[in-house]
Image (tube, rainbow, N blue to C red):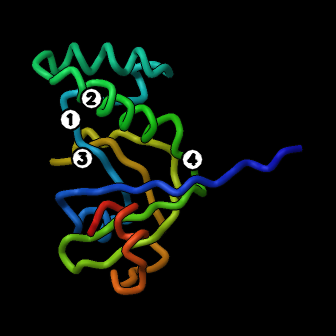
Amino acid sequence: MEAASTTVWGIHTMNDSLFLSQDLIAVGWDAMGDLSVIGASRDVYKEKYMEVYPNAKKGSIATCSGMLYRFVHEAREGDYVVFPSKVDRKINIGYIVSAYFYDATAAMYPNRRRVKWLKSLPRTAFSQGALHEVGQL
């Protein structure tokens, strides 16, 4: 039996306190609604994205719909999450502890997953190459 591999996901937000105080990661695109009812293929996500955002630039359609698809269908419980905080300039490391869920009552970022945060490290603990990979030079 082959062991499942663990993936490390990077995520960014404009609302650092939401992630850390509520022990979650989340994505917006509120107009897309509950992402779990869209279907389980990248093409269906692209079609829905073009329907909801008809003025989206052609290049952003595959990128954005792909991010949403991966958040729902590829991220797994036990996968690691790396989140660079803009507020305190720390790199937060945790792992996913829930399946995707949609919070219709959320004021922002209704598409969510619960996370167990393990560590918050200063950026100086990382090499320039690692910071570049996280997107935070």
**Mark earlier in primary sequence (1, 4):** 1
Indicate whether 134 appears above or below 122: above
The disc, 3 or 4, on the residue closer to the chain's N-terminal end is: 4
SS at mark 4? loop
Mark 2: which amino acid? Gly
Marked residue nearer the N-terminal end (3 or 2) = 2
Q: Which residue is mark 3?
A: 109
Q: Front-most of 73 and 10? A: 10
Mark 3 and mark 2: span between their CA atoms? 10 Å
Assign the N terminus to one quadrant of the image.
Answer: top right
Q: Residue at x 45, y 37 (%)?
A: 70
Q: Percent from the top left, x then y, of residue 125?
A: 41, 85
Give the residue type at disc 4.
Answer: Arg
Dot 2 surroundings within 10 Å: few (below 14), some, or many (20 or more)?
Answer: some
Q: Is residue 25 above or below residue 101?
A: below
Of the numbered discs 2 and 4, the one sitting upstream in the chain is 2
Q: Is residue 49 left or right of residue 100?
A: left
Residue under numbered circle 2 = 33
